[in-house]
Image (spheres, helix red, strand yellow):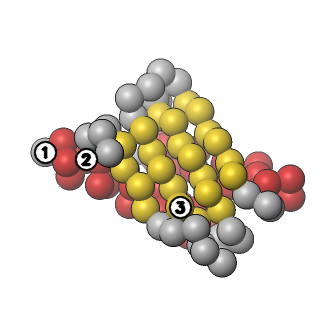
Amino acid sequence: MDKLQGSCGQVRKSDVKITVDLDTNGIEIIIISKFDKMFGTHMEEAVKEVLAEQDIKDAKIVIEDDGALDFTIKARTRTALKRIHEVLK
């Protein structure tokens, strides 16, 4: 994995795997979930909230979801970003 990429979580029931790539321009969010039609907007909003609080303007986020709640999505996103920042130190 590139030093500008980080991930957190697993693809299993009630969980989510978040993969973040900061080596991009703009924000791109890809959702892979059987719940995308019902909750895709909520998943995207949860990720965008974390990106905004950390003032990140360029990121590609892949959400591989199997029924995670929004607080789990936010926590996994924060941890993936933290792992990138730890590598960059």
The amino acid on which the numbered mark 2 sits, given as a three-letter code, is His
Is 49 in front, or is 62? 62
Give the CA distance from mark 2 to mark 1: 6 Å
Q: Which residue is mark 1?
A: 89
How packed mark 1 is, by other alpha carbons closer than 10 Å (few <14, some 14-19, many 20 or more), is few
Q: Position of residue 25 (x, y in %)?
A: 47, 21
How packed mark 2 is, by other alpha carbons closer than 10 Å (few <14, some 14-19, many 20 or more), is some
**Residue at image point 47% right, 34% down:** 59
> Is residue 23 visible to the viewer in this orientation of the structure?
yes
Q: Which residue is mark 3?
A: 17
The circle drawn on residue 85 is 2
> Is residue 69 visible to the viewer in this orientation of the structure?
no
Q: Position of residue 55 (x, y in %)?
A: 42, 37
Q: Quadrant of the C terminus?
A: top left
Tags 3 and 2 touching, CB below 8 Å: no
Q: Position of residue 81 (x, y in %)?
A: 37, 50
**Residue at image point 79% right, 54% down:** 36
**Regarding mark 1 in the picture, which secondary structure is present there?**
loop
Q: Which residue is farthest right?
A: 38
Tags 2 and 1 touching, CB below 8 Å: yes
